[in-house]
Amino acid sequence: AVLETLKPEEFSSVLWSCAKLGLRQGMMSVADEVFNAAANLPPGHLRSFSVQGLTNVLYALGEFLSGSSCLAFHGFIGELAKIMLDQVHKIAPKGLLYILESAHTFSWRQLHVPCMATLVSAAATAAARQGSEYTTPSLEKPCSWSGLTKRRCS
């Protein structure tokens, strides 16, 4: 009930904060309730979120659900990816990296989310267009996923 009273920025910040604090599904019932409530928001509610808020939610889900089943969140993540796809051109360079990191997390667990592959492709294309915005340290994780060395990736 509390989540419904939060503004989109506050809502995404709560989820992001849980992830940054290292909370994972099953560790704390209150955190589980917050993420379950998020997954059960009415369709379309995410459309009121800023691109940063959407990116924060995707990142938070990737972190919170690491090491656990994502099936209960499959539809919500798919809806999130679909909405983000429409706005990928507005996402800042760091946000694009968060999308790629989150997608890597979901694919590693073999969770095939609708629209995720298309979102990843669009985010990677946008990131390539903004190439001069990235520093070598910001590219370390994406390079490690692809097996590239820092030198070849920078």
Image (cartoon, helix red, strand yellow):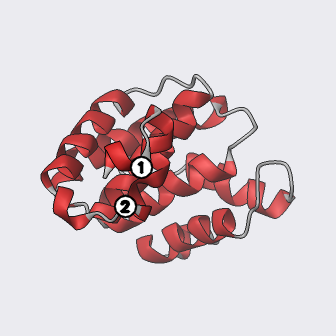
First in sequence: mark 2 vs mark 1: 2
Q: Which residue is at a point 65% across and 34% down the rendered structure image?
A: 70
Q: Which residue is at a point 36% across and 67% down the rendered structure image?
A: 52
Q: Residue furthest front?
A: 151
The residue carrying pointer 1 sits among few (fewer than 14), some (14 to 19) or many (20 or more) residues within 10 Å by Cα, namely some
Q: Is residue 73 above or below residue 19?
A: above
The quadrant of the image that shows the N terminus is bottom right
Q: x, y (%) of residue 110?
A: 58, 22
- Mark 2 and mark 1 residues within 8 Å of each other at the beta carbon: yes
Residue that badge 1 annotates:
150
Alpha carbons under labels 2 and 1: distance apart: 7 Å
Is residue 8 shown to the viewer in this render? Answer: yes
Q: x, y (%) of residue 87?
A: 21, 53
Instruction: Say which of 87 and 132 sits in front.
Output: 132
Residue 136, numbered circle: 2
Instruction: Say which of 111 and 3 sits in front.
Output: 111
Instruction: Say which of 30 and 141 sits in front.
Output: 141
Q: Secondary structure at mark 1?
A: helix
Residue 65, numbered circle: none
Q: Is residue 38 above or below residue 132?
A: above
Q: x, y (%) of residue 95?
A: 35, 61
Q: Amino acid at mark 2?
A: Thr
Q: Residue furthest left?
A: 129
Q: Which residue is at a point 32% across and 37% down the rendered structure image?
A: 120
Q: Amino acid at mark 1?
A: Lys
